[in-house]
Amino acid sequence: MASYYATVKWENQKEDFLAGHYSRGHTWHFDGGIVVPASSSPHIVPLPYSVEENVDPEEAFVASLASCHMLFFLSIAAKRKLTVIDYQDDAEGIMAKNAQNKLAVTQVILRPKVKFLNADPTPEQIKKLHHLAHESCFLANSVTSEIIVEC
C-alpha cells in the first residue's frame, strides 16, 4: 500500500471575496519541489477570476488518466521487447450530466499515437497493448468516467 500527497495553496489578495470577485489562481506543490500554477477552468469561472494559462483540475484529471495509461503501455511494450521511440496522446475529457444529474467528467477519450523502433506491430497487437494498459492503470480503475482508447 502507498500514500500520495499534494499540497494546494491559495491566498486572498484582498479582493471582494464575499461577492465572488477573487482570483481562483492557486498552486499545487508536489514532492521533489515541483510547483504547478493552477486555477479553475475559464469554462467554469469566467475571466478575470480564473487564470487561463494555469492548469485546471479538469485538465489535470484528463492528463493524469492519459499519463497513467501511457506509463503502463510503455512498461508492457518494453516487456514485449517493443522499443517505443515516440508516444503522444491528444486526450479529451467531456463534461456532462451524469446519471445522478450532476456535472461530471463523464467520458475521457485517449488518442495515443505510438512510434516503434525496428518494429511494426499489427493494429490488433497495438490494440491489445492498449487494452492491457487500460486494465492495469490504477487511475482508470479508480474513476467512474467512461474511458475510451482510440488507437
Image: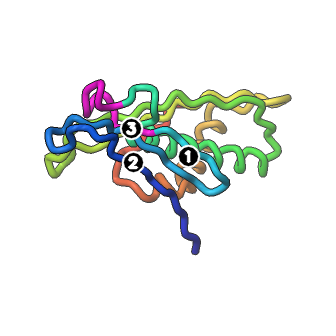
Picture coordinates of residue 7, whole percent (x, y): 48, 57
The answer to whether residue 67 is above or below residue 30 is above
| Residue drawn at point x = 53 percent, y = 49 percent | 134
- The first of marks 1 and 3 along the sequence is 3
How far apart are the alpha carbons under marks 1 and 2? 39 Å
| Residue drawn at point x = 26 percent, y = 38 percent | 15
The quarter holding residue 25 reads: top left
Q: Residues within 10 Å of mark 3 (few under 14, many from 20)?
A: many
Magenta segment: 38-50
Query: What residue is shown with label 1?
Result: 131
How far apart are the alpha carbons under marks 2 and 3? 7 Å
Judge from the rendering whether residue 38 lies leftward or rightward of residue 4; answer left or right.
Answer: left
Could you say whether the residue bearing mark 1 is in a helix, strand or loop?
helix
Could you say whether the residue bearing mark 3 is in a helix, strand or loop?
loop
Query: What residue is shown with label 3?
Result: 25
Query: What residue is shown with label 2?
Result: 10
**Callout 1 amino acid:** His
| Residue drawn at point x = 52 percent, y = 27 percent | 90
Q: Nearer the viewer, mark 1 or mark 3?
A: 3
The quarter holding residue 86 reads: top right
Visible residue check, residue 106: no
